Amino acid sequence: MNILKSFKQLLIVTSMLFSFISSFAQTDQDAIMMNKNLFCTGLIYSNSSWNKYWEGTNLRDNLNIGTISTNQISVMGNYGIKDNLNILFNAPFISNKASMGVLHSASGIQDFSAWVKWMPIEKSLKKGTFSLYLLGGASIPMTDYIVDYLPLSIGLKSSTVSGRLLLDYQLGRFFVTGSETYTIRGNTKLERNSYYTTSLFLTNEVSMPNVNTISLRTGYRSSALIAEAIITDMKTLGGFDITKNNMPFPSNRMNATTIAANIKYEIQKVSGLALVGGASHVIAGRNVGQSTGFYGGFFYILDFSKKKEKKTTSDNSSTQNK
Amino acid sequence: MKQNTIKIYLAIAILTLAYCSKKVTSRTDNIPALNPASIDITAGTWKTILLKRPDTFAVASPLLVTNVNYVAELNEIKGLQKNLSKEQDENIKYWAAGGVLRWNEIMRELVAKYNLPPYQNPDGTYPIPSSANPFAYPLFPFANPPYAARAYAYITAAQYDALVACWYYKKLYNRPAPYITDVNIVAKLPSTTLPSYPSEAAVLAGVTAEMMKLLFPTEIGAIQLKAQAHEDAAIMSGSATRSDIAAGESLGRQIAQAFIARARTDNAGKAVGTPADWANFETSTAAKGEIPWISQDNPKRPGMLPLFGKVIPFLFDTATTRALVPPPPPLTSSDQMKKETEEVYSYTNNPTLENKQLVLFWGDGVGTYTPPGHWNAIAAEDFISKNLSEVKWARNLALLNMSLMDAGIVCWNTKYTYYNPRPSQLNPAIKTLTGLPNFPSFISGHSTFSGAASTILGYLNPERAAAYTQMAADASKSRLVGGLHYRSDCEIGIKVGNSVGQFAVDRAKLDGAN
């Protein structure tokens, strides 16, 4: 069994806006499947920050908030139902604070997201391997966190469903992966009962525009090491610009083009353990922070396919889960 | 098999979300047409605010309903009603909910749109919006709470006087509505015996459009379109003819001039103050041995409208403004102030979810219709079910908004009399749960506005009096637990607001509308 092949890579998208639209792209962004009955789980810490943001298309600073920094811890998991059918989840804790001004920090458990990942096609093409993936995902807020507090809110509190097409081609140890994701976002609810976007609404409910994301990644992928570069372009399909010196709003048109690098390394001495890390930076955006982020963490694989003996604390949970 | 099941569930989930409508509906989008319990036919005798008499501005007597020119006007309506488009029908339905209500909502929308503090100059100073150059940045106006309170008051007071005059002429000339004179004209609004000359819709459109020229000059074009739509709705619904509209619009625009003349001389134009004024607040407070308020905006911004406390109120004179200013807050060095600062810290150090929600519900900060707008929303949504006539609607909202403006004046006068620092200035460890307003602490604006509003609304709608008192208490508490105000600011603010509201109650008891 090729353990590494079962691993995920991560992409930090902390890039996004004001911290919420979350996190690393989960392991739902890559062209790697867990083999049947394997459960891969991991813990990721990330930090991102920005001191400039795009107010509409105008890049500015704001001395009343200074630098907004986000710390995040995510629990992730990926289980192989079959070799070509996986389910994945992610649950983040997020903490935001401003370096200047008087605004209070915000923190809490944000949205639970889950994906089903299916690889219907994998075949040799020329000298390499071509594979096609279809993914469906959904996310739902796990707690009653405050939403109407941008840019410090930990999330937008909108339930979403997503569909993704992902294509991958591997030639020797080099690969290229492209994907497009369409996310339908459900309405969110503010703590107040009226708001102005480009007109006045007398309700707490906000219609959230959908989002389309295109991502391209390429790099080196071997059994012990993955190193890749990624460019991601997120576009909000609708919404409005932050007006001059106004507060950001959940249904703003938030766009971001992010570059990132990821690395994953398998510890040879401990079977099933891998370390991950990476960095990202938003190079262009609209109504989002120009954020720079870093992350690091580990993944560990539990084998549910046969009775086993050994290992660490994580084994306890594996027995329980059986 | 398993795989197929998952795929099916997923497909269902996606389709559900995609097809379940994301469209958001406002609470007043689909309310029924206004159907007054009383047409208040004697409202022409109600006590006006600025007008000396209801017939200060003359309205010529209308043509007889048998006159050929009037018959032609009726034919215009019949022709229009034959071919109403979907948009025209929707326009009728929108305005049918009530002209005073709809114009109130439009005002709140404009306040929210313009409630944006100017961005600083490169040298760290701030530009001041100019009514002489309203399209240049910063756009005029900055519709902050005092500005908004005054705008709501002027517009609703002018609407009220204009409708009293309108009702005076309606009764005098007693021209029946088109749908009564001509059976072939369909009443697309609830039919009443209210005379149609001059048209109350046109009076409202005219007076409001004219007031907006002063208050929101960059919106004149958009407002004119809405005024036109309001008048179109009146004609197409069979409620008014062209001559009812012309007489009404002219009357409304003339009456607005009386209010505009007052507004130009009520001292609001000087409320920004001068750099010398700004410096003087600080030095004179320090001279008393007190810690003066310091802006916590970065760069430091001059306090919001420091001389707004000198604006001439509607419900009382400026001597009364001064009499309503409460005694000083606890001295900044006192144990009491220390205790109150610690109390604020205790709320914000580890805020509860419930308090965070309360703070945001009543926040009404940048980009919103402000606390006075919030109270207009509360009042308007309660009045919808009361089946009031347009003139009674206008009277109630004028009383509310004169209270709010005058509460703002007394509150601002107090703030700049004592120039008291915010909790987060005395203890920088205090972090706020919503944006910190840029003006002195004592007394709380939210509390003063809310105290005034709950008092007059409790009189106008007694069955909800306890609810209004509770809402005012909540709004006030939100400023304490949000880290923006001390307990003294909130409790004394409510009391001062109650006193201001009582002036409106006293007026309401004698205005002839009960």
Image (tube, grey):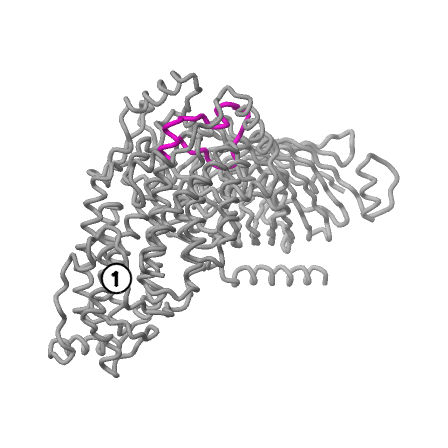
Is most of the magenta stretch helix, strand or loop? loop
Image quadrant where one finds the C terminus of chain B = bottom left
* Residue under label 1: B45
| Closer to us: B467 or A74 | B467
Quadrant of the snapshot with the N terminus of chain B: bottom right
Residue A110 location (% of width, % of height): 61, 43
- In the image, what residue occupies the spot 63% across and 43% down? A27
Farthest residue toward the bottom?
Answer: B183
* Residue type at tag 1: Thr
Q: Is residue A243 above or below residue A138?
A: above
Magenta stretch containing residue B32, yes or no? no
Relative to residue A61, is residue B86 drawn left or right?
A: left
In percent of the image, x 19 and y 61: which residue is there?
B249
Left or right placement of residue A268 versus residue A242 in this view: right
Quarter assignment of residue B15: bottom right
Q: Secondary structure at mark 1?
A: helix
Residue B429 within the magenta-colored segment of the rendering: yes
Residue B438 in sight here: yes
Tell me which segment is drawn in magenta. Answer: B412-439
Is B482 situated left or right of B317 in this image? right
Question: Which residue is nearer to you in this view: B503 or A225?
Answer: B503
Residue A289: x and y in percent read 47, 35
